[in-house]
Amino acid sequence: SGQVSLPLFLVFCVSVAVIMAVIVQKHVQSWWSKHPQARMGVPFVLSALLVGVALLPSVDQNSDLPALLRRDDRLIDVHLDIASSEGSSEMGRVMNPSISVQDGKVVFAARRHWMEQSQYNGWYNGSAATVLDQTWHSQILLGSVPLDMEAWDRWPLSGEAPFAAKLQPWYWLRTGGGHHWRQLCVAETYDSTNHTLVRHVVTGPEDAKVFSYRGQTNIAFSSLPPMGEDGCAKGEEVSQMYIAGDVHLAGSVDDVGHRLACGKTDLAEKNWIPFTHAGKLHFVYSPLPHVVVTATPEGECEQAYTSDFAPLLRLKRANPSLVIRGSGEAVFINDTKATPSLPKPHYLATLHMKASDKSDAYVHFAYRFSPEPPFNILQVSSQLPLLAARPTEKSSAAFAFVSGLEVVNRTVVISYGAGDRDSRALVMTMDRLDEFFSSESGPSALQGASWNNAANTSAADESASSAHEAGADIGGNTSDAVNLSSGAGV
């Protein structure tokens, strides 16, 4: 039942005290009385011991992941040298980075998180219960460094990262009411069989995507809703998507987050893909169906487009439990020489799949969609070769999760988090990425379906777009209906 027996606990304490007195105290007391001069050196020995322990190098929790893995002459997987400007690794791991090149700067957003668990006696609906708090301490970190364009262009070939950055927590993010982004709704689950109440507590925003819109830095992020004056409505303790426009990286002015009002408030929303078209801000709400909404930095949504991609539809029909969701940002590409498998303008984005909502393992793909409404999908790549890692804070399969995409001068950077504990990037030349769309050797089958045959098909060969403008019931999308207040990206 989780209850502690007080008599047994007192018996345990007395037993330990007796054993320590017989085994330790008696012998130490005898030595102390017989060596009056030697005991004068004890404080110095203890001081030296404490200093020595403090100087020991900290254990690298990512020692199992290589700092640089060269997969071929145009493709590398690399650890990103970004860290928090305050606190040590014991205060959380930096993960899920997003990178945007703007006005001669490399702008970063990342997430720092750590988990702690506490248990205590409490009440639920008037009855005694054991309360288990699972607290995910979450912060968004921001920063920028000058862009070294020559080093950026050489990155896939040299393997040398063109930056190292210290990021600071986004303390100046505020709610619409002017409050700090701290007191968030708490999701609770009660188990009547053992009278245990599990509270999923998240202390801040999660998984930011940084991008430029109308010459300003914007950040889209997910978060449990901030508590209002009357608390949180029943059933709405789920992640929602928010946006902050004209973000001040140095914190000189408070930034305000606004909820993107396109989805349902009682279904978890996450991983929308931002992009700009014709001077307007858009988001890919879901990859299947491929739903696109137009939005504003104030959180308003104006209209939507919907289209279907036949190869993904067939894959989904063959695997009904398959989950397909978006990742990162979308980037406009117009480089026919470097993209021979699709030699025309298009948007480049990423998506991920997993066998079911309960699965902890992800597979990631790049995909291309039309540069004009209804923004129908044109191609899906073969699987991206990310390094998966096991998380340290919970029992889970090894996984990786794409959190960002940037393309500058034919250098493609797909940033991701490995196992909720390492910030990494898959870096390659544009022509190398194009080979993922033209390769005949795709990823392995999932539940008996050939991923490559089902997904890596050009819409130029088979287009089943049933696009229609506006009027799309985006709130009816339930593919994101999971509780996202856990540490892993979903």
Image (tube, helix red, strand yellow):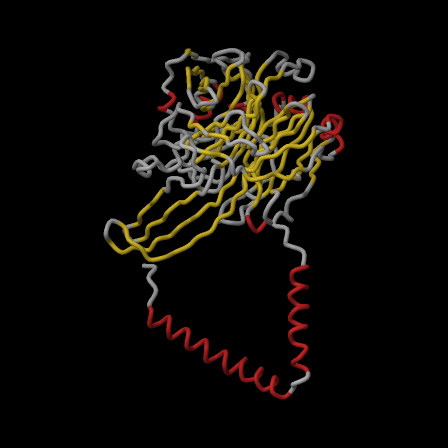
Q: Which of 149 and 289 is in front in this view?
A: 149
> How many labels were placed on the picture?
0
Where residue 244 sits in the image (x, y, percent)? 49, 28
Q: Which residue is drawn at 69% across and 22% down?
A: 410
Report which quarter residue 175 is drawn in. top left
Q: On the image, which quarter does residue 430 sit in?
A: top right
Which residue lies most toward the bottom here?
34
The answer to whether residue 176 is above or below residue 26 is above
Left or right: 103, with 193 as reference point: right
Q: Quadrant of the N terminus?
A: bottom left
Which residue is located at x 39 percent, y 35 percent?
A: 225
Q: Which of 171 and 362 is in front in this view?
A: 171
158 vs 481, left or right, is: right
Q: Which residue lies furthest to the left in this view?
A: 126
Place of residue 213 in the rendered image (x, y in percent of width and height, measured from the top left):
55, 20
Of 162 and 174, nearer the camera is 174
Whether residue 61 appears in this view of the structure is: yes
Q: Which of 3 and 76 is in front in this view?
A: 3
The location of residue 412, given as percent across then percent down, is 65, 26
Residue at 35% in and 30% down: 265
| Whether residue 196 is situated above or below residue 448 in the rendered picture | below
Residue 264 drawn above or below residue 93: above
Is residue 194 at all visible to an observer of this figure? Answer: no
Residue ID at (42%, 54%): 118
Estimate the x, y position of residue 268 in percent, counting from the top left: 39, 33
